[in-house]
Image: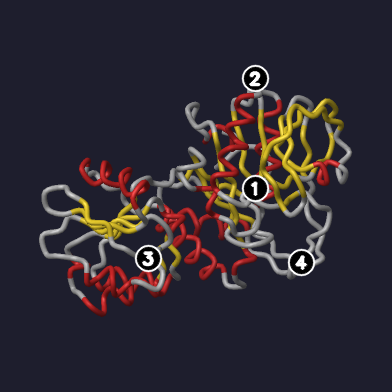
Amino acid sequence: MMLRDLIPENCRRIAVVGMAKNAGKTVVLNRLIAEMAGSKEVLGITSTGRDGEEQDLVTLTEKPRIHVPAGTLLGTTEVCLEHGNARVEILETTSEYTPMGQVVLVRVRQAGYIQIAGPDTNKGVLRIARALERNGASKVLVDGAIDRKASASPAITDGCILATGAVLHRDPEVAVEMTRHQVEMFSIPETQDAAVRQQWNRLLERGNVGVVGRNGEMRVIPVASAINNGRDLGNALKKEDRCLLINGSLTAKTVKELTQVTSLYKEIPVIVSDATKVFITEKEWKIWKHMGILLQVIYSVKLLAVAINPLSPEGYEFDKKSFKKKMQQALGEIPVVDAMEEGGLD
């Protein structure tokens, strides 16, 4: 079985995100590109940042370059095109701009190496992905750039491959536990309350934070965001309420403030758009669970696989078989792939 075999037919947009720099994300991207090259799929690629450079601009270490076959569609900038040797034709310009200039859509006419730079906002990436599809892409790979997990949001992509590895920590047990935490965050349950989902769509038009009452009605809380307003959120809750809706980021500070003014968090779920909006550490998450905080999402992240890289740019490496076994045991049914190995899966 190949890595591409883990991608369902109806999964058109796939995010490849890394837990950290040098986790093996670009290796995974290259592997997917190579595996899809022989299929009938028309592949589109864009990024939430910049990737494909020969040298990491921060660590000054060598990076794997991105090689694309003829026929590939790209959403990148003209500046990036100057740094690659693939021959392309420009299909259209866009209104999306990055620190590296305007994003353009191109088709690769002659295979070669490329760099990719795309929008750094969810809406911008979604617009580019849709534009690639309009130009014929049947699958779109969204490169998550450095530690940008937002591209895994179900609002942008249909599935996600998470890259992790030895770069996280010198102790493989710690690296496994850090990955398990991220996978658990991606697995936050989706609300099944139809009335809540209906009010979510109304909240997007009326504000950023709201409370759904017992009869399904919604009260909008007059705050700009949940950040730094946890006490206001907690004070707005009533015992008969069905949930607290947050359109935006949820941080540990907000939750801590909320729990300081009410105990209703044990009965009333806090609901955010998806898991990429939750920003907490592994330690904080354990505290939340111990306290009985209920957390749900409107849209769940579909994690297709976890790709491990047993090598670290700092010069150390894990035993491949042992690391993969530990990771698979920790993640259960989630497929674990060695990103550095070509070919099939165990």
The kind of residue on which mark 2 rests is: Lys
Residue at image coords 58%, 50%: 121
Q: Residues within 10 Å of mark 1 (few under 14, many from 20)?
A: many
Q: Residues within 10 Å of mark 2 (few under 14, many from 20)?
A: few
Q: Residues within 10 Å of mark 3 (few under 14, many from 20)?
A: many
Q: Position of residue 238 (x, y in %)?
A: 14, 65
* Residue wearing tag 2: 40
Mark toward the viewer: 2 or 3: 3
Q: Earlier in the sequence, mark 1 or mark 3?
A: 1
Marker disc for residue 119: 1
Q: Position of residue 335 (x, y in %)?
A: 49, 45
- Cα distance, mark 1 to mark 2? 28 Å
Q: Earlier in the sequence, mark 1 or mark 4?
A: 4
The kind of residue on which mark 4 rests is: Val
* Residue wearing tag 4: 58
- Cα distance, mark 2 to mark 3? 46 Å
Mark toward the viewer: 4 or 2: 4
Give the secondary structure at mark 2: loop
Image side of residue 127 versus residue 64, left or right: left
Give the secondary structure at mark 1: loop
Q: Residues within 10 Å of mark 4 (few under 14, many from 20)?
A: few
Residue 49 versus residue 43: which sits nearer the camera? 49
User: Is the C-beta separation of discs 1 and 3 under 8 Å?
Assistant: no
Image side of residue 302 versus residue 16, left or right: left
Q: Earlier in the sequence, mark 1 or mark 2?
A: 2
Mark toward the viewer: 1 or 4: 1
Residue 25 versus residue 213: which sits nearer the camera? 213
* Residue wearing tag 3: 226
Colour style of the rendered protein structure: secondary structure
Which quadrant of the figure contains the N terminus?
top right
